Amino acid sequence: MSTLVRDKLESTLRKRFFYTPSFEIYGGVSGLFDLGPPGCQLQNNVVQSWRDHFIVEENMLQIDGPMLTPYDVLNASGHVDKFTDWMCRNPKTGEYYRVDHLIEQTLKKRILNRDVDPLDRKSMEGVLATIDGFTGSDLVRTMQEYKINDPVTNDVLDAPIPFNLMFQTKIGASGQLKAFLRPETAQGQFLNFNKLLDINQGKIPFASASIGKSFRNEISPRSGLLRVREFSMAEIEHFVDPLDKSHPKFDEVSDEEVPLLSRQLQESGGSHLPVRVTIGEAVKAGIVENETLGYYMARVHQFLLRLGISRNKFRFRQHLKNEMAHYATDCWDGELLTSYGWIECIGCADRAAFDLTVHSKKTGKRLTVKQKLDTPKEETKWVLEVNKKLFGPKFKQRAKSIESALLSLPQDDLYSKHEDLNKNGKLTFQTNGETVEIDRSLVSIEMRTNLQHIREYVPNVIEPSFGLGRIIYCIFDHCFQIRPDDEERTYFSFPLSIAPTKVFVTTISNNEKFPSVIKEISQILRTREIYFKVDDSNTSIGKKYARNDELGTPFGITIDFQTLEDKTVTLRERDSMRQVRGTFEEAISVIDKMVHDPMTESTWNKSTAGFLPVAKP
Amino acid sequence: MSTLVRDKLESTLRKRFFYTPSFEIYGGVSGLFDLGPPGCQLQNNVVQSWRDHFIVEENMLQIDGPMLTPYDVLNASGHVDKFTDWMCRNPKTGEYYRVDHLIEQTLKKRILNRDVDPLDRKSMEGVLATIDGFTGSDLVRTMQEYKINDPVTNDVLDAPIPFNLMFQTKIGASGQLKAFLRPETAQGQFLNFNKLLDINQGKIPFASASIGKSFRNEISPRSGLLRVREFSMAEIEHFVDPLDKSHPKFDEVSDEEVPLLSRQLQESGGSHLPVRVTIGEAVKAGIVENETLGYYMARVHQFLLRLGISRNKFRFRQHLKNEMAHYATDCWDGELLTSYGWIECIGCADRAAFDLTVHSKKTGKRLTVKQKLDTPKEETKWVLEVNKKLFGPKFKQRAKSIESALLSLPQDDLYSKHEDLNKNGKLTFQTNGETVEIDRSLVSIEMRTNLQHIREYVPNVIEPSFGLGRIIYCIFDHCFQIRPDDEERTYFSFPLSIAPTKVFVTTISNNEKFPSVIKEISQILRTREIYFKVDDSNTSIGKKYARNDELGTPFGITIDFQTLEDKTVTLRERDSMRQVRGTFEEAISVIDKMVHDPMTESTWNKSTAGFLPVAKP
C-alpha cells in the first residue's frame, strides 16, 4: 500500500470515527487514541472471535487481574531492569529520540544515497539486519560509529541512556507502595499458577488466558495506531511438562501450511521471503522447537485468516539468537505487512521455566506440579534441617523468613554451604538484601537417599501473546478497498463475523409510510440477533450506500414504494455492489444464513440464487 | 444475610476461584482482586447483557478511550479539586483512616451503648442520616465534637486532611506531562461530543456509552470486592435538548414499578422504606425530574432483575440537596442490599450542561447543537468585535488566545465590560491567570438585534453510571443459596444468561467406553453454542454435583452404563436437584431452549414434561 493510499485509509477511518486521537480538543496526547462506535464494535467482535477461537475452543482458564502492579512483582519478572528502550535527547530542542528507530531511519536514508561507498552500504545493511538483537552498548557504539545526529536539526545529541517504559505510580494514602501499570497481562497468570492447577484438578498441560489493556510509555510514539501507549492485548500461558511438549490435538493442525522465516533463512541474507511448510513438517524438521509451540502457530494462522488478514501479508519470523531472552527455548513473531512495513503483532515463545522460577524464588512459595510416579524412584539429595528450638529465639520475628529462604536454597548452594559448615562451623547467605550468619548449632545439612513416590517439577510455559490493537489496524489496512472505476469510492471488505454492523436498513426517500416498515423489519432483525443500523439520514441513496461501504457494512436493505405494495425490498451486497429483490423474509434469511453459519460458507451467489436481479441505479 | 453466611459465601467464592486477592503470593495489595475463570466468565456474561440491554437495544454509540488522562482534562472536570476523601492519620502507628467511614463506624457503635443519653443518641442519628452530604469542614467539626480517636488503639488522631483519590503518573520521556488514571469513563464521551453528534447526523437526543476499568486510590479499602482500587464500570451519557427532556420510548416503560426512597422520605425520618410506584406516576408527580431520567431508572430496574438481583433488595435513593453536585438537577443512586448494608452500585444523574460547558470553556471549542429554526427569531444581544489591524501587532503571539478568550465572554460580562469601556476608555479581564488591559481602540462592544435562523445550545446530559464489579458482588450475595436439609451444601442460583457455564458433562465412573460418548455429546453442545465443561475428575458423582452447584452450573448431563446401550443420559437441574432421563438429543434440546430462548421463559417443568423421571441417588 502506497502512502497515498494510506492517507486515504486513515482519513476514511477518521471520517467514519473508527478512531480519533484522544483528548483532541485539548491538543491530544501522542500515542493515545479513542475508538469510536464502528471501531469499538469491530474491537468487540475481534475480542469475541479471539475468545471463541482460543478460550472456548481450547477450554482455557481465563483470569482478569488489575493493571496496577506492585514493584516487587515486576522487579522479579525482570521488567524493572530490562523493560527499557534506549533514548537520546537533543539538548537544544529538548526533543527525545528512541535510539534504535533513529539509527534505522538514518541508515535507511543513507543507503539510498547513490554516492555511498559499497563497503559502507554493506556494513549499514548489516546493522539494519541485526539491530533487533542489539544491546544498549551496541546502540551506543553504532550512534558514535555512524555519527548520527538529530534528523531534523542536525544538532549533536546527548549520549544514549536507557529509559524504563513502565508508567509509575503509588498506591495508598501513605504513598509508600511503589507500583507500575502492567506492561503485559501475563504476570497475573503466573502468580495464580497454584490456584489454576488446583481448579484443573492437578492435571497438566492446561492453558490460562487474559484479555485486557497494558501500557508502554513509548519515547516518541508515531505510526498512529501501531505504536501506542495503552493497548488491548490477549495472552495465553500454556503450562507443560518440560519433558513432554507434545500437544494432544497436534494432529488436527499438522497439515496447516504456515509461512516461516526461520533464523537460518534470516542469517543467510538473501530475499527474506518466508518458506511455506506444513507445521507438521516444521516441527519434524526441528525448525519449530516442539509440538505445542507449533500447535499454537497453526491456530494463530487460522485465527488471522478468519479476521480478514491477507494470506500473503503474514509471516512467522523466528527470533535471532541474540534477540531471544536467555531463558527462552524458541520464539517466533507473527508479523503482518502494512504500509509501515512488517509489524510484529503476535509473539509465540517457549519461555521454559523462567517466570514460575523467579516468582517462586522471590516469594519462597513453590509453584510446581506434583506427579505421582507409577514406579518409585531412588533420589539422593542434600537436605537442610533447622533446629527450631534455637532458631526462633535467635532470630525472633525474622525467623520465619530466614528459615524459608534457607529451605529454598538450591542443591548446588546446599553443597557449598555444607562445606562451609564443616570448615568454618558456620555459613553465611543473603536474604532480603542483608547477609545472615548461621552457626552449626542452628542448622544441619546432609546428603540423604530417599525413595521418591512423587516427581515434583516446575512446568514450562508456552506463551502466545497478541497485540489486538495492532491486529485491528492491520485488518483495516488489509481490508481497505478502492472501487476500480472510481478511486473516490472506498470500502472495507471486513469478514461478516467482525464487520461492525451486519446490515443497514434505509429508504429510497422520506415518505411518511416508510417508518412503520422500518420498524417491522427492525423487529425481525432483532429477533434473529442480527446487528443492524437504520440509516434515516436525509440524503441520496447513493450517498447512503457510499457511507455504509466506508463503514464496511456487508449488506443493505432498501425500502421503496414497491415495498408498500408487495413487501419486497432490495438487498445489496457491499463488495460486489450487486442488488437483488425479494420479500423481507427472504432477504433477512440470506443475511441470517451468512452471518450465523460461517462454517457452511454460505456465499452470496448460492444464497440469492432464487432472487430477482435488480439493475444498478 | 448474617456475617456467618457471608463467611460461607466468601469462602465458596475463594474455593471455586471466582476471585482471589491479587498478588497473593507476594502478600497481596488491599483493594486489588483477580477474577478467576468462573468469575471472569460471569463478568463476560454481565458485560454482554449490559451491552445487549443498553447499547444494542437503544442504539448507543460506544467509545473506548484510554485510562491515562492528562491533568488538564481532569482539572477542568473538577476532579483535581473535588475528587477527594478526607483522611486522618494515627501519628503513632502510621495508619490512615477515611474520616466519614470512621465517624459512621464509631457513632454506630456508640449508639448501641444502652447508657447513652437519649439526646446524644438523637444527635448521632442525625449525623448518620446526613453524613453523605457532609463537606470537609463538617467532617472536621464532627471529629472534634464527638472526640473520635483511633478505633483500635484509641490514640488521638492527626487533624483530617483531604486526599485526592486519583492515581498520578507521568507520560513521555521528559516526564513533563502530568496525568492521572481516569476515575470514570465519562470524560472521553464528553470530549468527543462533536464527533458523536456528527456521526448521528446532527440529530439529538442520542446516547453514547463506555465500558472499561476506572481507578480510585481508596484510603484504606476493606469490604472485599465492594471497595476496590481498580474496577469495571459502564457509563451512558444521554445528550438531550435542555428544553425537552421527554423520551420517545417512555410509554414502553411507564408501567414499570420501581422502589423509590425520595429525598422527602429520607428527610422525614422514619423507616426509610422505599415506596413502590410506577415510573410513569413518579415522573408525573415530579418525584423524578424528567422522562429521560425516569426512562433509564426503569431500564436499570429491568436490567438488575434480569441478572438475578432480588426485587426486595433494591432501591433508588434520591440524593439529598447538599449531597448533590451544585449543577445537577436530580440524582438517584441505585442501591443494593448486602450483608455490608445498602451499597451504591448505580448512579442516575441529570448533570445539566455542566460537563460540556467546562470543557468548552477550557479549550475554547464549541460543544453545542445547532438547530435550524422553522420560524426565525429576533434576538438582541451584546456583540464584541476586535480591531484586527491593531490587535495582532499589540499582543503578538498571545493575540489569538486573548481574542478567543474575549469572544467567549458571556453576555453578562459583555454588558459590564461595555460600561467599563464607556466610563474608563478601557476594560480589563483575566485569561490564563493574567490580567489583560484592552483600550477602546482595540475592541468595540455594542448591542445588536438579529434575526436568528439557528438556535445554538449546549445539550444537557443524563448519566446512568454502573459499578459492574459491585453489581457482580451483589449477584453473588443475592444468588447464594444453602440447601434446606444440609447447610454444608451451597449453590448459586445464577440466571441462565449469566451462569459461567451452562452445563457440565460427566460420567458415573471411569469406564474406558465413556470418553467417546463425552466427545459425541461435546460436539453437539458446541454446534448449539452452549457453553459447557467436562468434569472428568476422579471423584464420586455426588461430589461432582456439589462442586458444580458451587459453580452455579444450571444443568448436568451424566453418562452411565445405560447410555452405552440406548444413548440416554441423566439430565439434572441445579436449583431443584431434580433429575430426568432422555436421549442426548432430548436433553440438549431442553438446555438449548432454556438457554437461548429467555424471552419465551421456558421452564424446567414445561421443557421436561415428556421425560422419564429418575429417582434421586
Image (cartoon, coloured by chain):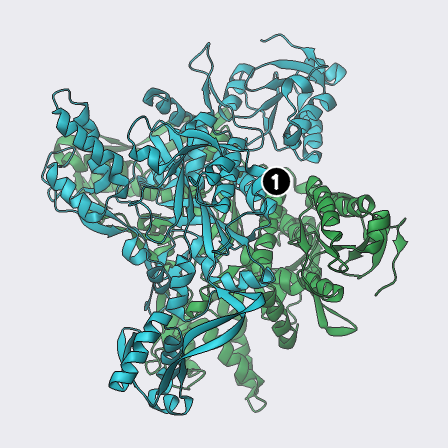
Chain colours: A cyan, B green
Rendered position, B533 above or below B417: below
x and y, in percent, of residue B433 in the image = 22, 49
> Viewer-proximal residue, A536 or A29?
A29
The amino acid marked with disc number 1 is His
Camera sees residue B268: no
Secondary element at tag 1: loop
Q: Quadrant of the N terminus of chain A?
A: top left
> Viewer-proximal residue, B548 or B574?
B548
Q: Quadrant of the C terminus of chain A?
A: top right
The mark tally for this picture is 1
Residue A153 shown left or right of residue B123 in the figure: left
Q: Which residue is mark 1?
A: B247
x and y, in percent, of residue B83 in the image = 40, 59
Chain of the residue under label 1: B
Residue B6 shown left or right of residue A431 in the figure: right
Residue B444 shown left or right of residue A320 in the figure: left
Which residue is drawn at the image coordinates 71% and 60% (left, top)?
B493
> Viewer-proximal residue, B604 or A291?
A291
Rendered position, B510 above or below A254: below
x and y, in percent, of residue B81 in the image = 35, 58
Rendered position, B169 above or below A93: below
* Residue B14 quadrant: bottom right
> Viewer-proximal residue, A311 or A516?
A311
Which residue is drawn at the image coordinates 33% and 59% (left, top)?
A169
x and y, in percent, of residue B66 in the image = 40, 46
Specify few, some or many for label 1: CA neighbours under 10 Å numbering under 14, 14-19, or 20 or more: some
Camera sees residue B277: yes
